[in-house]
Image: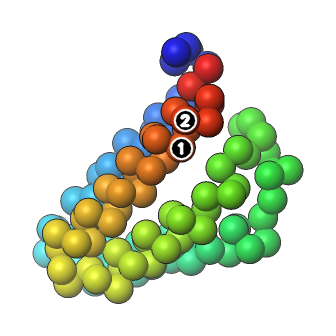
Amino acid sequence: MNFKKIHPLWIICIFVRLLLVYLPFIRKISNISKYIILFMGLGFLYKSIFGSNNEFQVKKVFWHKVRIVHAILFISASFYFENKKLSSFLLLSSVIFSLVYRFFNGHFK
């Protein structure tokens, strides 16, 4: 595997999404966090319907086919936000799915 070809923004994306896993446990901003996660999920849903693999975000988008998976996980996490463990698990599942998808589709080359 050649990790040198991974763009630093992808690493930042994964890091930020890992931080999101802890949002359900922060009481002071829990209502705001729920809506942030919901809007992110709706953004994934919007892009899965109206976006394409012809987009460029630094490089050509290769993850368009799985945006719907992230949408379902994020929207579910926002609906189950009161169940902190389930919500965190759904958000962590999105990150793990991203890593596995990238690895098995050869995008670590």
Q: Which of the two residues, 31 or 7, is positioned nearer the viewer here? A: 7
1 and 2 marks in contact (CB < 8 Å)? yes
Estimate the x, y position of residue 105 in percent, counting from the top left: 62, 36
- Rendered position, 28 above or below 3: below
Residue occupying image coordinates x 81% and y 59%: 52
Name the amino acid, label 2.
Phe
Q: Which of the two residues, 56 or 109, is positioned nearer the viewer here? A: 109
Estimate the x, y position of residue 10 in percent, counting from the top left: 53, 38
Residue occupying image coordinates x 22% and y 59%: 22
The mark found on residue 104 in the picture is 2
The quadrant of the picture occupied by the C terminus is top right
Left or right side of 83 for 35 = right
The mark found on residue 57 in the picture is none
Estimate the x, y position of residue 38 in percent, counting from the top left: 45, 78
Element class at badge 2: helix
Residue occupying image coordinates x 27% and y 72%: 87
Dot 1 alpha-carbon crowd within 10 angstroms: few under 14, some 14 to 19, many 20 or more: some
Residue occupying image coordinates x 70% and y 56%: 64
Asked if residue 73 can be seen in this view, the reply is: yes
Name the amino acid, label 1.
Tyr
The residue singled out by tag 1 in the image is: 101
> For the residues marked 1 and 2, what is the alpha-carbon distance in whole angstroms?
5 Å
